[in-house]
Image: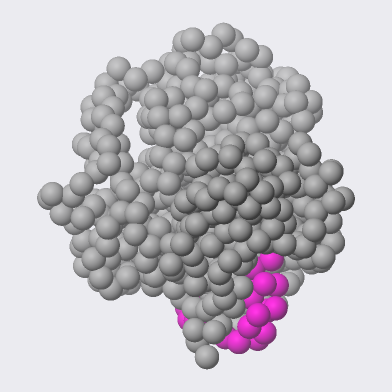
Amino acid sequence: MIIKGKAWCFGADIDTDQIYPGKYLPITDKQKMARHAMEGAPGGEEFRSNVKQGDIIVAGRNFGCGSSREHATVAIHGIGVSLVIARSFARIFHRNAVNTGLPIILFDEIKEIKQGDRLEVNIETGKLSNLSQNRVFQGIPITSLEMEIMKAGGLLDYLKKANT
Amino acid sequence: MTIIEKIFARAAGKDVKPGEYVWAKLDLVAMRDFGGPNVIQEYQSKFGERPVFNKENVAITFDLHVPARNEKVAVNQKFLRDFAVRQGVKLFDIDTGVGQHVLLESGLVKPWDIIVGTDSHMNLLGAVGAAGFGMGTTDIAGAMYKGELYFHVPPTINIKVTGGLKKFVTAKDIILSVLKNLKTDGALNRAVEFSGETIDNMDLAERITMASMVTEMSGDIGFIQPNDEIIEYIRARSGEKLEIIQPDANAVYEKIHEFKVNDLEPQIACPHSPDNVKDIGEVSKIKVDQVFIGSCTNGRFEDLKSAAEILKGNKIKPDMRLIIVPATMEVARESLEHGLYDIFMNAGAVITNPGCALCTTGHPGILAPDEVMVSTSNRNFVGKLGKGAKVFLASPPTAAATALTGVITDPREV
Ligand code: SF4
């Protein structure tokens, strides 16, 4: 599965309260949730107003730390983000991303990606091409089991399919 | 294989290695009044009214906001009650207590089971040798549908505790001193197995205290191999024969941490982190406004009894509030029968109904800004019990001694 998009760069330790502020937790409508994606993060306002369908979030280590709210992955996905690339993910965010069908990939050298770079990522092989800089890198894909779940659209769709 | 790996191997039907991802069969799926409604909504949006995988193995517990503290909570609780009736799953209503404890008492939890639930402290079920995982909404909805989930098999670290404790030093002091050393990320993505003679000799209440705070070390699961007493307790409650599983003699632990506790002093975790732990002697006699004795970590009969030993025949400071909350109705009854309620009331304490109580905001008893509380619970993060409030975590004897003097107090001094 190849994902192409423009990079939005964020720092390390972006917690779920920055990704989806706690005050919006009562919202249950997924489209309304999406309007607040990254609202609490530095650079989040610019992101929110300019992000295009298919864009890619690039972040440092421990992305999605903090509370276990699934709103975080739902909002990011809902606002149009097609992939999150990070040096590492917090355990619960990682699981929530897979479970809600949000593509993610691990990549160590995130400093090689600049804001606005056009990226092309094969999330199965981990091959990451920075089209703007004409360079190719290797990321670490999620496990094949997680990939199947993610591709099915998330855990519940995966289980439903497996059972019919 | 370590015991954790064996638990996964049994549930996956094949040998496993740490780091591997496996599908494992679940023995019990639990949710509570908080988070539970989201699980059901998610379940229904995908599966409608389809029956859960096995109604005997799904349980709903009410413990966080009991009785309902506002209309929103009341609506959520009704939603869960209706679902339980339609699906025929077990419901433990507002008259029961902290979910994990209620599940233990009801015989639904057995050693070497894999259990998932919506509370972050599911791993306290390791007290009887079950692998308890706190999970998100989608996981629990999927678990309820399929009776299986995928897991990352964590490497195991071993925490070995030896030596006898001094008077008024408790399991809570041991786990706080472990946190002081390992810190809040000390068991990140790891399973924690407690062992050693001190652990082997612990009763259920002490084991619960130890296992519950694995969450504060960021561990996936806490585990204590059951001794004969625990096996007997579970057999009597579940009515099932248990086939004992032992770790292999050549089990590989990622790390072994050893703790000798003969000289351990009462410990106290200062604001605002459970690993900001000091010997009680190192903390000055800070004035305390309120003391809370209870929670899933220290709400058992033995915990309340150790506090009663100190409170008996004494009165708390006039400008002090002492709130005592038994973990479950069974604990409340036992405490009542043994005269603890009399001791508490005579001392000037308020006793509320069983539940999670002052573990988090939204409960009767939270603090005004800048007030100070000593709590027997497990977390003292900023804002967890009111803006600007400061929370210290300690054992029931230390909490009781503090209630008597109005300042942070070593239980051996009263
Ligand atoms: S007392 Fe707190 S940590 Fe324990 S089960 Fe209740 S809410 Fe969770």
Image-based side of B389 in relation to B1, left or right? right
Question: In which image quadrant can residue A129 be found?
Answer: bottom right
Residue plotted at (53% across, 12% down)? B283
Residue at 77% across, 30% down? B387
Judge whether B28 appears above or below A68 on screen: below
Residue B413: image location, x then y, percent: 46, 12
In depth, the one of A120 and B33 nearer the eye is A120
Q: Quadrant of the N terminus of chain B?
A: bottom left
Please report the residue visible at 42 percent of the width from the left and 34 percent of the height from the top: B186
Determine if the magenta segment contains residue B240.
no
The colour scheme of the drawn protein is one colour
The image quadrant that residue B383 belongs to is top right
Viewer can see residue A111? yes
Q: Is residue B18 above or below residue B167?
A: below
Q: Residue at the far left: name it.
A: B249
Q: Which residues are magenta?
A: B38-58
Residue lying at the far front of the rendered structure? A134
- Residue B136 visible in the picture: no
Nearest the eye: B234 or B361: B361
**For residue B65, side relative to residue B106 (left or right):** right
Q: Position of residue B97 (x, y in %)?
A: 57, 55
What type of secondary structure mainly makes up the magenta span? helix
Residue nearer the viewer, B230 or B87: B87
Residue B41 lies in magenta, yes or no?
yes
The image shows residue B390, relative to residue A155, as above or below, that is above
Q: Residue at x 65, y 36 (%)?
A: A11
**Residue B155 at what x, y percent from top left?**
32, 48
**Side of B39 relative to B269 (left or right):** right
